Image: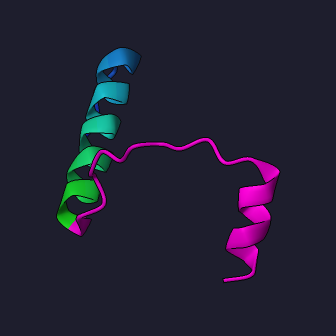
């Protein structure tokens, strides 16, 4: 990380750091989101 007096620059640095860590962990992949209704949720619970 780092430090800067500008709050917007500090926010940018923090987000950049988080994104880099997510990439290193392999969890920074875009996924398609699916809306699931209650019936489908109940089916998932029974798996």
Location of residue 7 with respect to 41 vertically, above or below: above
The percent position of residue 27, horizontal first and vertical second, equals: 30, 60
Location of residue 16 with respect to 11 vertically, above or below: below
Residue drawn where x is 27% and y is 46% of the image? 19
Q: Nearer the viewer, residue 20 or 39?
A: 39
Residue drawn where x is 36% and y is 16% of the image? 8
Judge left or right: residue 33 versus residue 24: right
Q: Quadrant of residue 12?
A: top left
Range of residues picked out in magenta: 25-47
Residue drawn where x is 30% and y is 45% of the image? 30
The percent position of residue 11, horizontal first and vertical second, equals: 37, 27
Location of residue 5 with respect to 42 vertically, above or below: above
Q: Nearer the viewer, residue 21 or 13?
A: 21
Any magenta on residue 37? yes
Examine the residues drawn in magenta and state their main secondary structure: loop
Any magenta on residue 20? no
Q: Quadrant of the C terminus?
A: bottom right
């Amino acid at each position: 990380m780092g430090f800067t007096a500008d709050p917007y620059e500090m926010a940018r640095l923090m987000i950049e750091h988080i994104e880099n860590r997510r990439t290193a962990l392999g969890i920074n992949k875009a996924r398609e989101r699916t809306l699931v209704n209650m019936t489908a949720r109940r089916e998932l619970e029974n798996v």
